[in-house]
Image: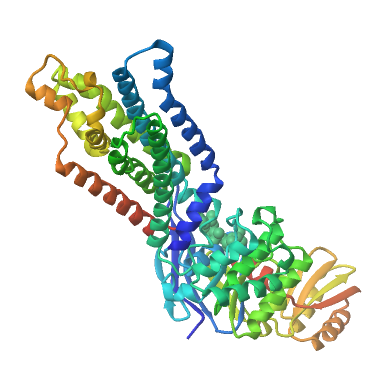
Amino acid sequence: MGVIVALTLKEAMRRRAFLGTLIILVALYGLSFLPRAFKEAFGGSERQFEIGVNIAVLFGVDIIKFFSAVLAILLCAGALTAEIERGYLAAILPRPLHRWELYLGKWLGVMLFSAANATLWTAMLWVSVAVQGQPRVEMWRALPYVLLYPVLYGTLALAFSSFLGASIASMFTVAAGAFAYFSDQFLRPIAAFFDVKLLQQIVWLSEWTLPMATLKRLVQQRVDTILPPSMDDAPPWGTEAMLRFLKPEVQTLDIVYVGVYIVAALLIGLLIFWRRDVQ
Amino acid sequence: MWAIETRNLRKVFRPLIGGKPITAVDNLNLQVPPGTVFGFLGPNGAGKTTTIQILIGNVYPTAGEAFILGHRAGALAAKRKLGFLPEKFQFHDFLTAEEFLRMHGRLAKMDGATLQKRIDEVLELVGLTQRRKSKIREFSKGMQQRIGLAQAIIHDPDLVILDEPTSALDPLGRRRVREVVQYLKERGKTVFLNSHLLSEVERSCDVVAIIDRGRVVKQGALDELLVNRSVVSIELKRVEPRVLEAMAQVAQKVQPVDERRVTAEVAQEDDIAELARAIVQAGGALMGLQAHRETLEDLFIQTVEGESK
Ligand SMILES: Nc1ncnc2c1ncn2[C@@H]1O[C@H](COP(=O)(O)OP(=O)(O)OP(=O)(O)O)[C@@H](O)[C@H]1O
Ligand SMILES: [Mg+2]
């Protein structure tokens, strides 16, 4: 299986994924200096500068979440059916290895690659705010949960790619993500404030379909000490139940659910790939 | 124990939506003796590639069984002793020839020292030693096919399955493949190859099977299938029934081509003169006669055309 992992990593490098990585590194670097630039341009207190750094860090974490997930989707979506169609696997599969070894080898290769990237990005952001005298250890606390983004989306994309071509597999994964994002960011507040039961059920369902909001809360919990005050305040109106729906508590079971979800997606994809004809 | 054995092997492709199912392999029974070079022949779409894909475990049969060297097709034990060159080959072309072979050697669980030695050997065998450091992407189609052949034999397998190994090769490359096949045969390996170049097959194979529409229609040792039979092309001033009748007394098969020409098959070479005498005695005006030993191509065309009638 090590050979497959190595091959997957080599393939990832070859696809100029590094160029993308570099662009994001530069973007994060620039972002980390924005608060200082603002302070110098418009003046402002030390406290305002600190809050500015917090905002930049939170935004940076979002960028890392997003792009490591995108990277994992891109690499996973073309990993199976697309490679079968291009004929790459025809000579690999007759080798004495189980199909699950190939599947998990690819999975592991992409996960290692995206995780390495996300860690590199985090390190970059951390170092560049630290040299400004503003180290934010919260980023490291959040990293394990941030890494679950590429794992979640990559696993899903790989499962789709066990029977779909690269573009359709990534489209399905992105669509699932977009639906989860839309229902969390848009439907959730509407459902809460207008107290619409049906919408609340849709939001609830979407969270089961793809535990993205769950994951978001888990990341947020690690960085909540640097959440800007205004964002942390509860809205001035609404019943207790509405507010709970708007901002659900993080529960211990959340991480278990995310884990179970990932394992289930991995197993379903594996089963499909195991049973299909490869030609 | 057969090197390859299939029992009532069947594969039906069912489209997911609409369309009618295609039976690619239909009750196929094959027995490949170990140590032979086995030619697997058939017209386009006969089911050769599908059968091979089942043998190597890439495709699951709808029914029936396939065994490789006594192991069920697709089992790890079977794959360990198997080398394969795909028909539609497309390799990881960002690797160099050497890296590519090393990857396959490691996938085949070879140890480092043996592998390094073997890489040199197989590169020499397929004539790519000079290009060992080149990326496969920079290879011509024929060179890619040759590196594919090298990959198939890197781990010294007991059975080598080649799906159209010469489709991209020039005459020199084809000769090289013949030599590799010979080399494998001398080492007691079994080679199972599928090719449309029947003259190649005739030169290197001991046993052949011809399949059509998923079934074996002829199987046997080449020298038994092509026993001394000759095909005679005859030109007459005019083809007359009387003459045809006389020819049929001698020949196994008589087939008029047009008003002037007839082809006939005789069981042995002595019958050619006999045939000429029969034509003349029946009053036929013989203009020309040309005989040649039946080739695999003749047998193939006859068998497949005979089937479709
Ligand atoms: N994945 C598939 N889905 C549907 N039909 C298929 C599939 N693969 C092969 N077939 C059909 O099965 C039949 C046999 O195909 P196969 O590729 O085995 O033929 P072949 O003998 O190798 O032909 P050729 O000499 O052209 O390579 C053909 O009718 C083909 O259209
Ligand atoms: Mg074929």
In the displayed structure, B303 sits above or below A216; it is: below
Residue that lies at the very extreme toward the left in this rendered image: A240
**Residue visible at 80% across and 86% down in the picture:** B269
Camera sees residue B297: no
Q: Residue B97 or B292: which is nearer the viewer?
A: B97
Direction from residue B256 to residue B3 in the image, left or right = left
Q: Nearer the viewer, residue B40 or A13?
A: A13
* Residue B286 x, y percent position in the rendering: 90, 74
Residue furthest bottom in the image: B270
Q: Quadrant of ligand 2?
A: bottom right
Which quadrant of the rendered structure holds the C terminus of chain B?
bottom right
- Quarter of the view holding residue A170: top left
A262 lies left or right of B285 = left
Quadrant in which residue B88 is drawn: bottom right
Q: Is residue B14 visible?
A: yes
Count how many numbered circles sit on residues in the image. 0
Task: Give B16 or B110, whichever is nearer the viewer.
Answer: B110
Q: Quadrant of residue B182?
A: bottom right
Residue at point 44% right, 54% down? B21
Image check: B291 left or right of B125?
right
**Which residue is painted at 60% across and 82% down in the image?**
B36
Q: Position of residue A13 (x, y in %)?
A: 53, 47
Residue B41 picture location, percent across and down:
62, 69
